[in-house]
Image (cartoon, rainbow, N blue to C red):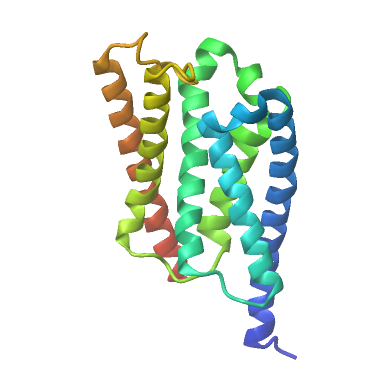
Amino acid sequence: MQPTWSDRNIMMKKPVFIINLILVILEVIALIHDIYVFGAGLFVWYTIDSNVLQLLVSAVILMTLCRGREISKKLTAIHFVSAVGLTVTFLIAAFVLAPEGGIAYYFLENVAPINHLIAPLLSVLSLLFLEKSELPGKTVIFLPASATMLYGLICLFLNAVRLIDGPYFFLQVYDQPASVIVMWFAIIAVLCIGLAALYRVIRVRMQKR
């Protein structure tokens, strides 16, 4: 007996459910650790913000699937933000921070493997290759950059009024020339837009299969 369209649809949702369940479990573990280590100041870290956003996205995906509903276009748009944000954390950690601070610290110790490697991989895997939803318009490629720039501007202000220090070197307004800060903002904005555009192209091609 051939499976019905409904049966195939359920089978396609199982990997999405499993991946996002794993993400929720891992992100909760990482969040508990980060609360213990950083306390109330944990949200100054872009890495933690991106992982917490992914935790919320994955939790909503699980609730959506449990209710037998389709993943909404708005939820997919927010997933673009978390997936790109997590990819940026991986790239910055791998190519900027780890060469100076050590690969072990950024990828092997405590919950670093979750925050910097496993969560980015699972988030992108789910968004690009497993989830089926109506794709947001082309303007979605600017959402991750907008969210990231908002984070950066808030941190710059908090650094300027000396409420926080960093947490990243290019946010330390009293220790870095303005040109360095502007350069890093530009690099990260372009990186966010480029990744989001690439991810959208992949999603479009996957949707056509």
In the figure, residue 130 lies in which quadrant? bottom right
Task: Please report the residue visible at 58 percent of the width from the left and 48 percent of the height from the top.
Answer: 54
Q: Is residue 134 left or right of residue 31?
A: left
Residue in front for this viewpoint, 171 or 117? 171
Task: Please report the residue visible at 69 percent of the width from the left and 43 percent of the height from the top.
Answer: 27
In the figure, residue 113 lies in which quadrant? top right
Residue 106 percent location from the top left of the image:
61, 22
Residue 67 percent location from the top left of the image:
69, 75
For the question of whether residue 108 can be seen, the reply is no
Task: Please report the residue visible at 59 percent of the width from the left and 41 percent of the height from the top.
Answer: 51
Q: Is residue 76 left or right of residue 67?
A: left
Residue in front for this viewpoint, 11 or 177? 177
176 in relation to 25, above or below:
above
Q: Residue furthest left?
A: 179
Residue 53 percent location from the top left of the image:
56, 47
Q: Is residue 8 left or right of residue 78?
A: right
Residue 18 percent location from the top left of the image:
72, 59
Q: Is residue 83 left or right of residue 66?
A: left
Task: Please report the residue visible at 47 percent of the width from the left and 22 percent of the height from the top.
Answer: 95
58 in relation to 66, above or below:
above
* Quadrant into which the N terminus falls: bottom right
In the figure, residue 32 lies in which quadrant? top right
